[in-house]
Image (tube, coloured by chain):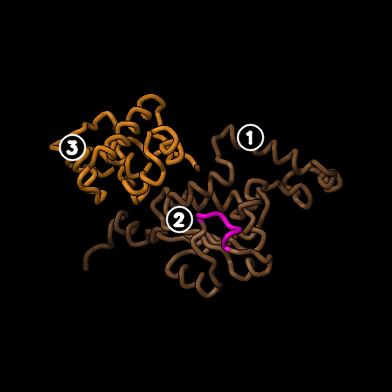
Amino acid sequence: MSEPSTLDSIHADTLPEPITKVSIIISKGSLDGIYPALIMANGARAEGIEANLFFTFFGLDAIHKARHEHIKMATVGNPGLHVPTMLGGIPGISTAMTHYMNHKMEQLDIPAIPEFIEMIADTGAGMYACKASVDLFGLEKNDLIQQVQDIITVGEFYEMAAGGQIIFT
Amino acid sequence: MPTTMIAATQIELNDEGFFVHPEQWTEEMAAELARRESIDPLTDRHWTVLRFMRSEFLDKGTGPTVRALGKTSGVSVKELYQLFPKGPAKVAARIAGIPKPRGCI
């Protein structure tokens, strides 16, 4: 019997399979709820990874024609922000914090949500809305931005997600 | 680190296939590097991106991300992905002989 393989081949044997496909679920409608998902989707495409985005529940605001330009920071119940909840609830605080955050992101050349979503669609990522949520909020396809390909059921989502990783945000 | 022969020159590549010494790169190597990425032939539009990547790298020490490419190279994000389906910034950097651009957007 020959000696066990060299370090190199041990490394090759245990090298994890690269990720080739992701399905990202966006369930929150706050600025801090939406951006991480968009950054992960855009980053996946940049790495050549197939990506589909599924907007559900309040995440639908990110693809809602009338709402996606007005996504706000959550200033209540958001301990990471280090703003006391009593203060966070004062009218105007959420808007002010959102302005501040948008300004910081602009400095880093992070696009605004509508532009970011358009860019992600241009990368070839799929955009889908959850049927149950669309029905719940009484929406129609026409209420959603044109980049949304379809309104789909949970079953169709799982079919589409087959063979890839699912990320829930 | 793996070395490989490209256009009759011994080239050192890192584990992800990027040039370790970008100064070794010449335009004659691009077609062969592109074929390794399943891009054949290299069109003028590919070259617009490659030259832009190269000059950005020489200016700034790092290659542009897809977002920066889409805004400033004269090639839209949509077309970038048509030209380089496996990731424009990453694949174009390999073909242009520069390190992998770093950036989250």
What's the mark number on residue A15? none
Point 80% across, 41% down: residue: A92
Rate crowding at label 1 as few (under 14), some (14 to 19) or many (20 or more) other CA atoms within 10 Å. few
Query: For this view, does A50 lie left or right of residue B36?
Result: right
Three-letter amino acid code at the position of disc 1:
Lys
Give yes or no for contact between labels 2 and 1 (Cβ–Cβ under 8 Å): no
Q: Badge 2 is on which residue?
A: A125
Residue A168: x and y in percent read 58, 62
Q: Badge 1 is on which residue?
A: A104
Q: Which chain is orange?
A: B
Three-letter amino acid code at the position of disc 2:
Ala
Give yes or no for contact between labels 3 and 2 (Cβ–Cβ under 8 Å): no
Rate crowding at label 3 as few (under 14), some (14 to 19) or many (20 or more) other CA atoms within 10 Å. few
Residue A83: x and y in percent read 79, 43
Point 54% across, 51% down: residue: A38
Point 35% across, 56% down: residue: A11
Task: Determine the secondary structure under disc 1.
Answer: helix
What's the mark number on residue B10? 3
Task: Determine the secondary structure under disc 3.
Answer: strand
How far apart marks 3 and 2 lie (CA) works out to: 38 Å
Three-letter amino acid code at the position of disc 3:
Gln
Which range of residues does the magenta coloring cover? A141-147
Q: Which chain is brown?
A: A
Camera sees residue B79: yes
